[in-house]
Image: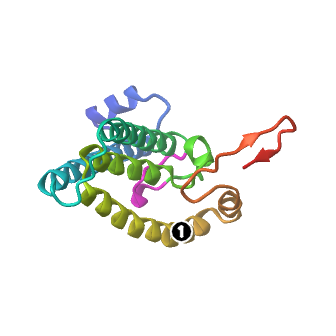
Amino acid sequence: MSQPEAQKNQDYPGRSSHEQKSDSLRRKVVIIFFLGLLFMAVLALGIGWACADWGSIRLGWLNQALGPALAVGGLALVGWSVRVQYVLGQGTPAPKVATQRLVTQGPYAHSRNPMTLGALWMYLGIGIWMGSGMVILLVVIVFSALLTFIYIHETRELTDRFGEEYLAYKKRTPFLWPRFTILNGNKEKIS
């Protein structure tokens, strides 16, 4: 065993070299994912700035309150979703380093696609904050196409990977928008 490899094994006692490489790859994929998210946010800001006069939506203080709240809340939901995938599912958002387990906890207990929902909120928040109808329109178009792809591809892929476990999860958990229910005294759901 080479000196650097021996040092790595000492840094992670009880972990095989394969597990360490897998962790390293997952960390790199998560970093690349968040850099891509940042790049798209900068692109949205650039489009909003360049197209400031096209479809301007000025709602006064509402732009300044609702936009950042949506953007920050969306980013928090994305971060939570990635963290749950990484820790509980032992995977990443990238299909090449997919989760090893079906994740149904955390935000995934309320939506099958909380990461996409968070990104949608984030980019819509940027558009609202900037008062840019163009950014909002582009977000709606891009996410409509993305959600169609996810619905078709991911549903099939997860059914193949996790079978009945995924089908049961799919039946009880909404695709994107969480169900908001209130429990009455008898613990019955009231929609």
| Foreground pick, 63 / 144 | 63
Q: Is residue 144 above or below residue 53?
A: below
Q: Is residue 45 left or right of residue 62?
A: left
Q: Is residue 43 above or below residue 76?
A: below
Q: Which portion, as a residue range, is magenta?
A: 89-98
Q: Is residue 112 visible?
A: yes
Give the farthest residue toward the right: 186
- Magenta segment main secondary structure: loop
- Residue at horizontal 12 percent and vertical 55 percent from the top: 50
Look at the image and say whether residue 7 sits in the magenta stretch.
Answer: no
Q: Residues within 10 Å of mark 1 (few under 14, many from 20)?
A: few
Q: How many labels, in total?
A: 1
Report the quarter where the N terminus lies: top left
* Quadrant of the image occupied by residue 19: top left
Horizontal and vertical percent position of residue 31: 30, 43
The structure residue drawn at horizontal position 54% and vertical position 57%, both measured from the top left corner, is 176
Look at 42% across and 44% down and name the residue there: 78
| Quadrant of res 3 | top left
Q: Position of residue 164 (x, y in %)?
A: 71, 64
Q: Residue at x 62, y 57 (%)?
A: 174
User: Viewer-proximal residue, 134 or 155?
Assistant: 134
Which x, y percent locates residue 42? 20, 48
Q: Nearer the viewer, residue 176 or 170?
A: 176
Dot 1 amino acid type:
Glu
Q: Position of residue 86 (x, y in %)?
A: 47, 43
Residue 158 lies left or right of residue 163; in this view the side is: left
The secondary structure type at the circle numbered 1 is helix
Asked whether residue 96 is drawn in magenta, I would say yes
Question: In this figure, which residue is indicated by the disc labeled 1?
Answer: 157
89 sits to left or right of 70: right
